[in-house]
Amino acid sequence: MIRRFLLSATALVPLLTVPARAEPVTLLDLLTVDRLANMGGQIVINALRGVAEVTYAHMDIRPLDGRMILTGLEVSPYEEPDCTITLDRAVITTAPLDQIAYGALDIDVLGFELGDGCLSERDRGDLAEIGLTEMVLDRGQIRLEYDYASSGLTLDILADTAGLAELRAHAEFSYFAVNFDREEPVADLAYAEIEVTDQGYWSIISPEIPPMMLLPEVIVPQLVDELLPRYVDPDEAPAPAPIPEAPSDGKGDEESPAPTPQPAPINSPEDEAAFAFIEASAATFARFAANPGTLRLEFAPETPVRLNEDLLDEFGPFVAALSPMLFTDADRPDSRITADEAAEIQTWIDGGDVEFGDADLMRYAHAFLTGIGAPRDPGLAMELLTPLLETGNPDALDMALGTLDALDPAFAYQIARDAAAQGDRLAFAHLDRLEAAMPLLDVLELQDEDGGDLSLSGDETGRELRQMAQAALSGLGAPRRYSDAYFYALLALASGDAGAALIVDELEAMGDRMSDADATQWAETLAAIHDRANTVWFASPASE
């Protein structure tokens, strides 16, 4: 048996050593974007090897998909052999190259560690004083999304180290750019939140904090002295000087004394708001210290605030502008939808005898739209918002416009079209983008669902008819309906308004963007509208 096995193995050796048949590869096959990108990545790694020992397990760069993966990275500088930097996995994601509406960058890091040899003894001592003996990041993520049209920017940051803490930050800028003349950012902050969840770090550093420093009655005066040097405690303010009475001549005909003027406010409204924030925050932090969990700082200004040096110089105006609030998990309102509420929502959807107020519909829709308080379900959220959208509720409209990309394109187009018809410029800005995502004939069908009122008094001038055509073509202030626009433009042009020719030409050229079958159907639609325009024109008294 052994000999037979050895003979068989010996016979297989030549077969195992014969190389596999190579498939012919041309130069063009090698010159792909992905292959060239990976070759560029390897060149960068080799350049780094000129100053440090660099190894990695896997690298994959795909520019067309906007994705790069690097695993098992280990770096050790030649000049500092005791310094070792390791990274388990890094994923860098950008917006796909075919996406030109927005830019995105997502850097996701797992298992980053900076060895002790990378820090000086002094640095290690300073870190040890604040409870950090290892420089380890279990998970880190930075995500940026930038909308080119509005210049809006969204920033998300996550840092998590087991046994210490988790940090999460989110910021929304309604406008973000860079002023090259002043070399500084131009940022309008709409909302921001910073959240820290304790995972053991508080138990490490809390023994170093004197218990008295956690008492609000101790910490508040210190913070006020530091942040609000001009603030005056109303209880300690000097009483206003009394107004002396006018001397009497004894005849009793003196005029009644003038009313005592009210003293001027001791502190500015901004400083009063800042003091209230300090006082509330000290009480919140004391609750966190007693029961560590999540501490959250939120900035929710009523309108976006332009961040600049003047705003950051003084604490009072800063608080008044950004409306910060510090709270713990226990302070946050419970926004969860209960089982009973879910049953009522289902009954309402089924047409049952359940009535919801506007506030209830908004709360339920927000929960299903954001996924906070109920499992995320944009379709159900829009169903709850529909009655409010039909009545033109502005809050419901703002909520719907913020999630158009998550909806069915046809439904999203209907929402934006109806809102733009009511004069909402933000909705109007979305119309062309949403139309581009659908076949043009589908767009025309959606426009014709609610019909068009083509009745005319007969007294309209050519200019008035052109304005009606322009309104129907643009969709701002009137429902966008291309058939109506063509009808009014034909009559305006026939009335001698030469400007209407541009509208007629634009609508007739739409067929150039369609397939042959769709273009034929569009031509038939225009022909029917043309016949109707002829009927109206030649039936008018002016044509007799």
Image: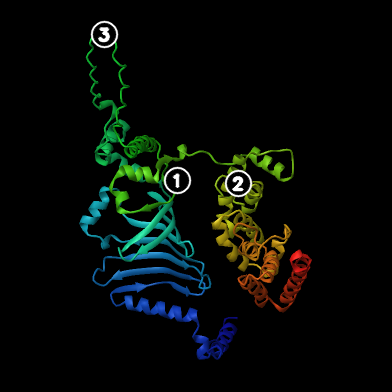
Residue that lies at the very extreme toward the top in this rendered image: 250
- Which numbered marker is on residue 462? none
Name which residue lies at 35% across and 60% down. Answer: 185
Which image quarter is the N terminus in? bottom right
Sequence-wise first label, 2 or 1: 1
Q: Position of residue 60 (x, y in %)?
A: 47, 73
Q: Nearer the viewer, mark 2 or mark 3?
A: 3
Q: Position of residue 44 (x, y in %)?
A: 36, 77
Q: Amino acid at mark 1?
A: Glu
- Residue on which the image places disc 2: 393
Whether residue 523 sits left or right of residue 182 in the image: it is right
- Residue on which the image places disc 3: 251
Q: Amino acid at mark 3?
A: Lys
Label 3, secondary structure: give it. Answer: loop
- Which numbered marker is on residue 302? 1
Label 2, secondary structure: give it. Answer: loop
